[in-house]
């Protein structure tokens, strides 16, 4: 009976570990960072920051510059697409694949809007009249170098 309980416990624990495994879904580069106060928009100068995004299907984890220990975790609340203005800004909104998620840590509320093309994080500090918007675009993966031929190059 004790062996059976141990086997069931190990199986249950391994299922929980597998369920919380985060998988990489994309990399994004910070393009714009703004503070909004009332009707005033203030650009905040920032160096380019690379973000990596991971998910377990229930949560989104965002890390900066590959530092997986320092991350923000968001709870996914919508995965049925996000609104997107058509090219040129003159068209109607269309729904594209994407999701929305929230995080509330230490009184700071964050909203994440994620698609294949971009990631927007809107931060609402708890005791501030400012709203901070960070806009990032999808990083282009680097192409692997593939040799054209296995033959050595000839000197001219």
Image (spheres, rainbow, N blue to C red):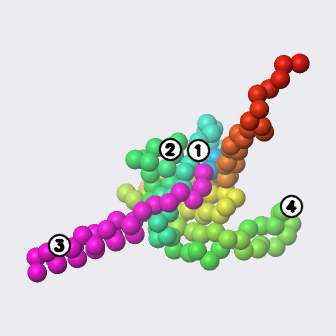
Query: Which residue is farthest front?
Result: 151
Residue in the picture at 34% in, 71% down: 15
Disc 3 from disc 4: Cα separation: 62 Å
In contact (CB < 8 Å): disc 2 and disc 3: no
Q: Which residue is mark 4?
A: 88
Please provide percent x and percent y for residue 64: 51, 46
- Pointer 4 or 2: first along the chain: 2
The disc placed on residue 66 is: 2
In the rendered structure, the answer to whether residue 35 lies left or right of residue 58 reads right
The quarter of the image holding the N terminus is bottom left
Please provide percent x and percent y for residue 107: 40, 59
- Pointer 2 or 3: first along the chain: 3
In contact (CB < 8 Å): disc 2 and disc 1: yes
The label nearer to you, 2 versus 3, is 3
Q: Which residue is mark 1?
A: 50
Residue 109 painted magenta: no
The label nearer to you, 2 versus 1, is 2
Inspect this view and state whether residue 94 appears.
yes
The label nearer to you, 4 versus 2, is 2
Observer-nearest of 145 and 33: 145
- Pointer 3 or 4: first along the chain: 3
Residue in the picture at 77% in, 72% down: 93
At numbered mark 4, what does the secondary structure look like: helix, strand or loop?
loop
Quarter of image, res 19:
bottom left
Q: What residue range appears in magenta?
A: 1-27
């Amino acid at each position: 009976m004790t062996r059976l309980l141990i086997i069931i416990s190990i199986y249950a624990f391994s299922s929980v570990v597998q369920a919380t495994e985060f998988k990489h879904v994309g990399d994004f580069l910070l393009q714009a960072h703004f503070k909004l106060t009332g009707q005033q928009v203030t650009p905040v100068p920032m160096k380019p920051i690379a973000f990596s995004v991971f998910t377990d299907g229930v949560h989104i984890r965002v890390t900066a510059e590959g530092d997986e220990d320092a991350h923000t975790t968001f709870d996914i609340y919508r995965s049925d697409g996000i609104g997107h203005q058509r090219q040129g800004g003159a068209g109607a909104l269309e729904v594209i694949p994407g999701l929305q998620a929230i995080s509330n840590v230490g009184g700071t509320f964050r909203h994440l809007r994620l698609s294949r093309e971009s990631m927007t994080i809107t931060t609402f500090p708890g005791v501030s009249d400012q709203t901070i918007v960070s806009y990032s675009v999808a990083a282009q993966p680097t192409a692997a170098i593939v040799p054209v031929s296995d033959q050595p190059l000839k000197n001219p």
